[in-house]
Image (cartoon, helix red, strand yellow):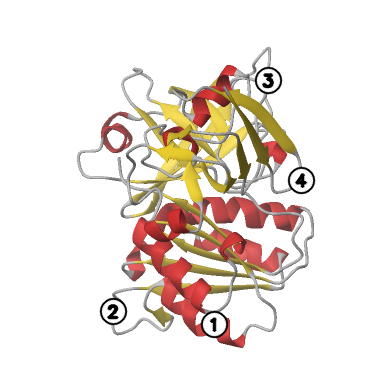
Amino acid sequence: MYKVSLLTRDGATIAFDAEPSDTLLDAAERARIYLPSSCREGGCGACRVSHASGEVELMSYSDSALSEDERMAGDILLCRSQPRSDLALRAPFDEAAVGFAPVPERRATLVAFERASPAIMRLHLQYEDDTTYGRAAQFTAGQFVELTLPDGSTKRSYSIANAPNWDGTLELFISLQPNGAFSNYLRDRAAIGDTLRVRGPQGQFTLDDASAAPRWFVVGGTGLAPALSMLRQMAELADQRPCRLFFGVNKAEDLFALDALEALQAALSQLVVTLCVWKPEKEWRGFAGTPAEALAQALPAATETPDIYVCGPPALIAATEETARAAGVPHDRIFSEKFTAA
């Protein structure tokens, strides 16, 4: 039996015991400590932490969940790591992201859905009253939920786009995939009044409130959703720190939630939004290229090193991390959440 100590971003220490045959995630859950995770198979990176001291053995995992650069910097995946000695770990999330009870499972009603762009669906869900959790949508801005289709056949995870609220509403942006089970449901069968099971909130991709640095968000496609949640939370709290958003899509027609971005710019006068189109038409007047390329142009002129929050496909994450590190942004000031199509 080994001793494991996990230091959270806000200075709390989480301790538990682990057997050599345990994954660190399983060992924590046996102690009724529920650390941020999602796929549990080394494919998503949601349970990534930094390994400070001690020996671990990493089982197989996807390079998209843990890159070679991240591994060399000392990062590990809790779901794929077994202890070989006492361990000291550092988490890129606050204590609030750690659960001491199982992840909530609730029911929600589909109250609205519409195309946000040709390939993106916008959903609004309303939590049902629950004897344990009430009605409120309580989560930390940037987290995600796992949805199960009404027939129970398919589960998928999606980031929440709105801010926490007492009304119990969730806004989600879902990319429509060819022949995807959830996508086919939304295209062909979804109806107002459908009931879906919601497991969450989950995830560690949240704001570091202890940092006073400017916040720069680099997002691609539906990676915009958690950034919207964080920025909306900042607007509600009248947070006046400098912030920028680099939002990228392949074609101009793929842009979405522009009304939400306009509302945020009205509420956050310091917010600078850069819309990036990778393959623009001739009439496009915004930035031509990826959000990582826009970031590379902006960083040299920054008067203060920002915290970088990046969400999107693995290629965008890798390019953004490389760009940010080359500009002198420390590894621990780059926060990321990768996603891939199911």
Displayed quadrant of residue 288: bottom left
Q: Secondary structure at mark 1?
A: helix
Q: Residue at x 49, y 33 (%)?
A: 84
Q: Secondary structure at mark 4?
A: loop
Eye-nearest disc, 3 or 4: 4
What mark, if any, has residue 133 been given in the picture?
3
Label 4 crowd bin: few (<14), some (14–19), many (20+), radius 10 Å: few
Eye-nearest disc, 3 or 1: 1
| Disc 3 and disc 4 in contact, CB within 8 angstroms | no
What mark, if any, has residue 281 been given in the picture?
2
Q: Amino acid at mark 1?
A: Ala
Q: Which residue is mark 4?
A: 11
Mark nearer the N terminus (1 vs 2):
2
Residue 148 image point, x, y percent: 41, 25
Q: CA distance from mark 1 to mark 2?
A: 23 Å
Q: Which residue is mark 1?
A: 298
Q: CA distance from mark 3 to mark 1?
A: 43 Å
